[in-house]
Amino acid sequence: MHMMLLLHQHFNKKTRSRRKRIASLRSSRRPRLLSCSSRTWNWLNSGGPSGATEDKTSKVEGTGSGFVWDKFGHIVGNELPCGCETGTDKSGLQGCKVTLVDIAGSRLVRVGKIVGFDPSCDLAVLKVDTNGHQIKPVAVGISRDLRIGQKCFAIGNPYGFENTLTTRSSLGSNNGFSDLATWFLKQKLRPDIVADHSHYAKPTIPENYEEDTREKLKSAIKAIFLKQPVAYALENLYQAVSDLCLHKLGGNLYQRIEKECEAHISSVLQSLVGQSPDLGVFLSLVERCWQDFCDQMLMIRSIALFLDRTYVKQNPSVRSLWDMGLQLFRKRLHLSSEVEHKTVTGLLRMIESERLGEAVDRTLLNHLLKMFTALGIYAESFEKPFLECTSEFYAAEGMKYMQQSDVPDYMKHVEARLHEEHERCLLYLDANTRKPLIATTERELLERHIPAILDKGFMMLMDGNRVEDLQRMYQLFSRVNSLESLRQALSSYIRRTGQSLVMDEEKDKDMVSSLLEFKASLDTIWEESFSKNEAFCNTVKDSFEHLINLRRVCVCLPFNLSLIKCTN
């Protein structure tokens, strides 16, 4: 939306004086007007937004405009960037990119913290660190001194047009306004203007104005969905919607817009039925359909924004135009069961192909899964079958790899798979999927094979003093709460191996040195592989005491038990 920049001018001033003031606004070398854009940011360490660097692969998610409010770096702008994907620093504040340009073309780029916003008025307040640069607050008029005929300037990016300036005079009778500024001023920007508005006269509308406006909107909505030029000026359509809302005709208008949107959404989704049997091509068609829908609904919402902020706001049970569009898309997608099923199947096939080592279009996956999230059907329509397919995939893979691989290689494979699934959540899956996905992977690749892993590889790792592999085993087992099984395996190993040392009478001369060497290797494993776990330390101690007692049954062994205590 336009940001309204009101310049106080007495209507009895000469035209030359007005022009001079406008020129002074534009000619200042210190920036007052600016543009903002929301991007995905990578915050550097603890530096927060003031030390942000832009992700080179990111794209602009939204743009807005505004003006400098004070010399301390506070900026008033439209709320659009706040609704986009932004970074958050440790203070919990969101940020977006702010660019200030003076008349000489000098650019000052800063990251602004969003310190507050009001979606109902499309306003946001940002704070930037000027670092010694001089910025000049814009001159703001005094609302009580406004008169009919004075100029209003709107500077911004309305309806997708960038770097625009619109000028119009305040009109109407009884000191009222009938243009776009009327409603804006009646909101929170200048509430004192309408402290007492009982004397305002509501302008009458021509006969058949409601029906004519509906037909114009119908034509515009049709053109937007068909990607054709709109035959009417968007600002005029906006004004027409405002007039109908002011005359309490918003309900009928909302229903007409909803009806037109549903018809076109139904038509678009139905056109996908029977499309390409190639799932990759089909998914691309669905993505294009979704992206077009989002762009089109944003355009329709821009035209009918006044409807969203009056009729919808006054009726809590009525959805916003954007939510209404999502609900219609969700409804029609469910009715087009072939499209929904084919889309889910294609997504699952792509992910399975990626798990098998094939390259896939992760951006396509990301966009379509965000579509499911926005529609509110991600958990039921995608996540549930996805977790089922994941369970089947890793159950089969776990059985195959356990038979074909030795234990160290299998554990490395499990570790790699867990990392891949975690990365998958970061790249395109919903964040809430991470926990059940990792749990499913751990269950199928680890938990089901704990006994087989211990039987097949634990003794081999201990005999070979494979500290790194034992550490990997300890870490993986801790993920599935199986350290008790590992501790019991350690106890059995010490007793079995130690018994061969203490019960071999032929090696009595070397028994003490052999036990000390055995104990030293266990201490190393306990410290480096088992994270100095106290329970494992007690297991080593108890197992050695068992060996000593076992030896004493046969002979008197002069052995100091203090030598076998675990090092703390």
Image: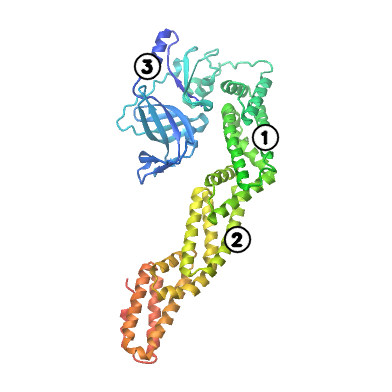
Q: 403 above or below 244?
A: below
Q: Secondary structure at mark 3?
A: helix
Whole-number angstrom distance, CA of label 3 to CA of label 1: 50 Å
Foreground residue, 114 or 186?
114
Q: Mark 3 belongs to which amino acid?
A: Ser
Q: Mark 2 belongs to which amino acid?
A: Glu
Q: Mark 1 belongs to which amino acid?
A: Glu
Q: Which mark is residue 49?
A: none
Image coords of residue 261 (percent x, y): 65, 33
Whole-number angstrom distance, CA of label 3 to CA of label 2: 71 Å
Relative to 427, is 103 on the left or the right? left
Name the residue carrying label 3.
24
Q: Earlier in the sequence, mark 3 or mark 2?
A: 3
The C terminus - image quarter = bottom left
Q: 50 above or below 394?
A: above
Image coords of residue 458 (percent x, y): 45, 73
How many discs appear? Answer: 3
Foreground residue, 40 or 94?
40
Taking the spot 53% from the left edge, 59% from the top edge, the residue there is 439
Residue 499: quadrant of the picture = bottom left
Name the residue carrying label 2.
392
Q: Earlier in the sequence, mark 2 or mark 1?
A: 1
Residue 51: quadrant of the picture = top left
Residue 381 appears anywhere in the view: no
Q: Which mark is residue 262?
A: 1
Residue 182 appears anywhere in the view: yes
User: CB atoms at circles 2 and 1 under 8 Å apart?
Assistant: no
